[in-house]
Image (spheres, grey):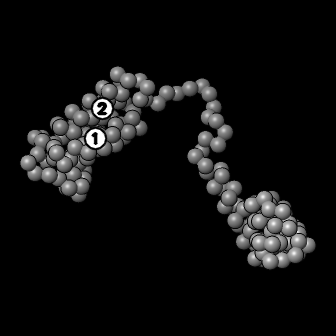
């Protein structure tokens, strides 16, 4: 029995994919469901490619279509596998962390406006939660110097935010 490498499988699946997608679209009536089913079919067949190469199945389209149909039937039999629509709004921060990343990016842009000493003081005291004394020890500076650099840095950041509005 011959085996199939990933490139050969991809070429064989790409050949049957347009026709298979049209069939799945006709069966599901929804392009999103058809694309999801097409992806699931690809994954199922790619796992089998070593033992049952797609190119040895005659015809390959029929084999891929039967696999897709079985996956569709499985989703009908087990509704827990399907996504369900609800009337509830998503939880806060449902965006997968985009809001957190945007906030972090904005903070980095503001920190870039500061001198290295000001930025270090703001990071250590405000972001890391160190006291002025601990930040001074970490930076090798006096407590008052850290406090002064922090206050200057925060003032520059406030000014930049006021300008942006």
Q: CA distance from mark 2 to mark 1?
A: 9 Å
Residue 37 coordinates in the image, percent (x, y): 34, 37
Image quadrant where residue 19 sits: top left
Q: Position of residue 158 (x, y in %)?
A: 84, 63
Res 162 → quadrant: bottom right
Give the mark nearer the N terminus: 2 vs 1: 1
Pick whichever, 95 or 119, lies toward us. 119
Which residue: 10% across, 51% down?
A: 2
User: Is 10 placed above or below 138 here?
Assistant: above
Marks 2 and 1: CB-CB under 8 Å?
A: yes
Is 29 located above or below residue 102 in the figure? Answer: above
| Residue named by callout 1 | 44
Left or right: where 86 falls relative to 9: right
Q: Is residue 26 left or right of residue 128?
A: left
Q: Which mark is residue 74?
A: none
The correct choice, above or below, for 43 with respect to 128 in the image is: above
**What element does badge 1 sit on?**
helix
Tag on residue 71? 2
Does residue 9 appear left or right of residue 157 in this picture? left
- Any part of residue 21 in sight: no
* Residue ID at (61%, 49%): 97
Q: Nearer the viewer, residue 15 or 39?
A: 39
Query: Is residue 75 toward the left or the right of residue 19 in the image?
Result: right
């Amino acid at each position: 029995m011959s085996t199939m490498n990933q490139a050969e499988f991809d070429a064989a699946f790409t050949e049957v994919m347009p026709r298979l997608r049209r069939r799945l679209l006709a069966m599901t009536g929804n392009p999103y469901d058809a694309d999801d089913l097409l992806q699931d079919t690809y994954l199922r067949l790619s796992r089998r490619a070593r033992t049952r190469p797609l190119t040895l199945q005659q015809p390959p389209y029929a084999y891929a279509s039967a696999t897709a149909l079985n996956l569709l039937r499985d989703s009908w039999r087990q509704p827990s596998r399907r996504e369900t629509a609800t009337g509830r709004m998503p939880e806060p921060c449902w965006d997968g962390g985009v809001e957190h990343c945007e906030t972090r990016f904005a903070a980095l842009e503001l920190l870039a406006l500061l001198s290295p000493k000001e930025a270090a003081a703001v990071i250590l005291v405000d972001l890391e939660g160190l006291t002025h004394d601990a930040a001074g020890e970490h930076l090798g500076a006096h407590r008052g110097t850290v406090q002064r650099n922090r206050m200057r840095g925060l003032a520059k950041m406030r000014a930049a935010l006021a300008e942006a509005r």
